[in-house]
Amino acid sequence: MVNVHQAKTELSRLLEAAERGEDVIIARAGVPVARLVPVRADERVPGRLAGLIRLRDDFDAPLPADVGAGFGVEPK
C-alpha cells in the first residue's frame, strides 16, 4: 500500500508492479481508496463468442409459473 504522494512520485514503478500482477493499493491518510490493476487485452472483446453460442428461439419467452414463482415473478 502506498500513499497518494508516493504514488505520484513513483507512478512508473507502480505501473510496472501492477503489470507483473502485484497488488498495488493507493491510500489517502492510510485509508485505501484505489487499486491499480493491469488492463488485460483479452477482457471483454465484443463478438469474441460469435458463432459459438446458440440461443433457442424461445429463450425470452415467459417463464413457467412455477419457475417464475421461485424468482418472485408474478404470473400474468
Image (cartoon, rainbow, N blue to C red):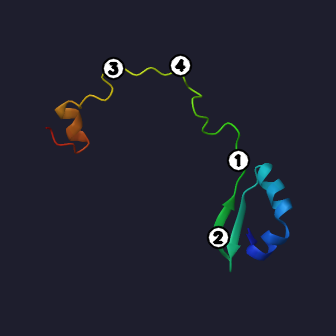
Marks 4/1: CA–CA distance: 26 Å
Secondary structure, mark 3, is loop
Q: Residue at x 70, y 64 (%)?
A: 25
- Give the residue number, with chain letter if any, for mark 4: 51
SS class of the residue under badge 1?
Answer: loop
Which residue type carries mark 2?
A: Pro
What amino acid is labelled 4 in the image?
Gly
Q: Earlier in the sequence, mark 3 or mark 1?
A: 1
For the residues bearing labels 3 and 2, Cβ distance under 8 angstroms: no
CA distance separating discs 4 and 2: 43 Å
Query: Helix, strand or loop at disc 2?
Result: strand
Disc 1 designates what residue?
39
Count neighbours of disc 1 (C-alpha within 10 A) and say few if under 14, some if 14 to 19, many if 20 or more: few
51 up-or-down from 30: above or below: above
Query: Left or right: 47 with respect to 28?
Result: left
Mark 1 and mark 2: Cα distance apart in space:
20 Å
Residue 19 position within the rendered picture, expressed as x and y whole percent measured from the top left: 79, 50
Q: Where does label 2 land, which residue?
A: 32
Q: Is the residue marked by circle 3 packed among few (<14), some (14-19), or many (20+) residues within 10 Å?
A: few
In the picture, the quarter occupied by the C terminus is: top left
Amino acid at dot 3: Asp
Picture residue at 59% right of the left edge, 28% below the top = 48
Q: Which mark is residue 57?
A: 3
Answer with the quarter of the image where residue 5 lies. Answer: bottom right
The answer to whether mark 1 and mark 2 are in CB contact below 8 A is no
Q: Is residue 49 above or below residue 28?
A: above
